Image (spheres, rainbow, N blue to C red):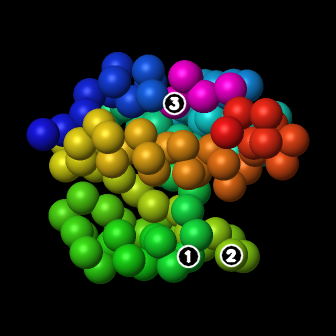
Amino acid sequence: MGVSVEEFMAIVLRLPEVSQHESTGYVGFKVRGKGFGYLWEETETVGLKATVEEQLALVAERPEVFEVQFTAGRFGWVVVRLAGIEADELTEMVTEAWSLSAPKRLLESTL
């Protein structure tokens, strides 16, 4: 069980029109200028955009893997410990985070 930083990067960079932005201590990911994820390589954690409902459900179900990062409007960002999640579940979460930020036309042409 667990996903490496390299595996996470492969998952996120497979999605259409993803750009990455290096900053002090983390890497941010955007689709057409809208953020949907972050990687903190040092702690092997990622932050992903989700709905508030999903955020709360994930944290309640497995607090050893997920924690609340912050909420903004109808979105709840979730911190994910890479060591505690399997690749297929992380792929689903990353894809969902991406889809919450991607423009409708991009979603329609991709899905």
Q: Quadrant of residue 42?
A: top left
Residue visible at 32% across and 40% down in the picture? 88
What's the magenta region? 12-16
What residue is shown with label 3? 12
Q: Is residue 104 above or below residue 42?
A: below
Picture coordinates of residue 111, whole percent (x, y): 67, 39
What residue is shown with label 1? 52
Label 1 crowd (10 A; few <14 / some 14-19 / many >=20): some
What residue is shown with label 2? 74
Q: Is residue 28 left or right of residue 67?
A: right
The three-letter amino acid code for the residue at tag 2 is Arg
Distance from label 3 to label 2 (Cα)? 23 Å
Residue visible at 68% across and 75% down in the picture? 74
Distance from label 2 to label 1 (Cα)? 6 Å
The three-letter amino acid code for the residue at tag 1 is Val
Q: Secondary structure at mark 1?
A: helix
Q: Quadrant of residue 40?
A: top left
Q: Is residue 43 left or right of residue 72?
A: left
Picture coordinates of residue 29, whole percent (x, y): 62, 35
Is 65 covered by the magenta stretch?
Answer: no
Label 3 crowd (10 A; few <14 / some 14-19 / many >=20): many
Distance from label 3 to label 1 (Cα)? 21 Å
